[in-house]
Image: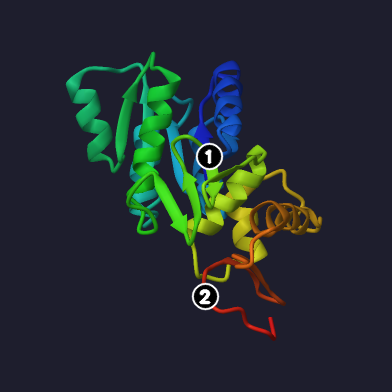
Amino acid sequence: MRILLVEDEPAAAQMLAKGLREQTYAVDLAADGEAALYQASINDYDLILLDVNLPGKDGLEVCRELRTNGMTVPVLMLTARDAVQDRVAGLDTGADDYLTKPYAFHELLARVRAILRRGPALSSDTIAVADLVIDQKARSVRRGGSIIQLKAKEYALLEYLARRADEVVGRADIDEHVWDENFDPFSNLIEVYIQRLRRKIDDNHSRKLLRTRRGEGYMLTIGEENPSA
């Protein structure tokens, strides 16, 4: 999942981004309200982590403008303002949740998971495709009861495909949601990771779950294989 982190304090932004990336999220950074609105207008984010105290347009103004522009991306506000009226103001501008500083990183992760779980593709922390089981809370993967060891980006790619099981997912979608703004769309990195995943989840199994649709993209499915794909 791809997250936009809006935080004007460089050290705090880098520390939080590092922690999120270690949890397999792709993270873009914006240091002020105008940059956040621009980033949100050109990229498809799954979540925005929005600090309230920003230079120029503050987080409340940014959130209000996002909603006015018809953007439905979930917003989790982060702020040191802990008065009830501040929390109410944040939620009334269109935020989905509100977390006061200082906060425990594990609580932030739990809230991120809870917000992402509200999407139509998810209803629990576990996704199952045939005998492939993905535990999103533990970031673990099993097939046929056996643990599959995945690196962070391999896991992120598999989780995204699993969220859209039985759909053909194109390279552009994968680029938007699994990698951040530094990804080179002309590289063959996606194909490399698809091959790594295929070896790890499908080798030694008669039923192949990860399919390639030529000219279209990839899909994770238990459906019948298309011989022309």
Say whether residue 24 is visible.
yes
Residue drawn at the location 52% of the way across and 75% of the way down: 223
Determine which of the numbered discs, if any, sits on residue 140 in the image: 1
Q: In this view, does 13 lie to the left or right of 128?
A: right
| Colour treatment of the image | rainbow
Q: Is residue 186 left or right of residue 92?
A: right
Depicted 206 relative to depicted 85: above or below: below
- State the residue position of label 2: 223
Depicted 190 relative to depicted 115: above or below: below
In this view, the residue farthest toward the top is 102
Q: Is mark 1 on a helix, strand or loop?
A: strand
The answer to which of 181 and 109 lies nearer the viewer is 109
Q: Is residue 81 left or right of residue 58?
A: left
Locate residue 148, reporting x and y percent: 61, 44
Quadrant in which the C terminus is drawn: bottom right
Say whether residue 58 is visible.
no
Q: Is mark 2 on a helix, strand or loop?
A: loop
Q: Please give the count of numbered marks on the rendered protein.
A: 2
Residue drawn at the location 36% of the way across and 47% of the way down: 117
Locate residue 121, reporting x and y percent: 39, 58
The answer to which of 184 and 118 lies nearer the viewer is 118
Residue drawn at the location 61% of the way across and 23% of the way down: 14
Q: Are marks 2 and 1 in contact (CB under 8 Å)?
A: no
Q: In this view, does 57 lie to the left or right of 100?
A: right
Locate residue 225, reporting x and y percent: 61, 78
What amino acid is at disc 1? Ser
- Crowding near pointer 1: few (<14 within 10 Å), some, many (20+)? some
Depicted 165 relative to depicted 17: above or below: below
Q: How far apart are marks 2 and 1 (CA)?
A: 24 Å
- Crowding near pointer 2: few (<14 within 10 Å), some, many (20+)? few
Residue drawn at the location 47% of the way across and 34% of the way down: 138
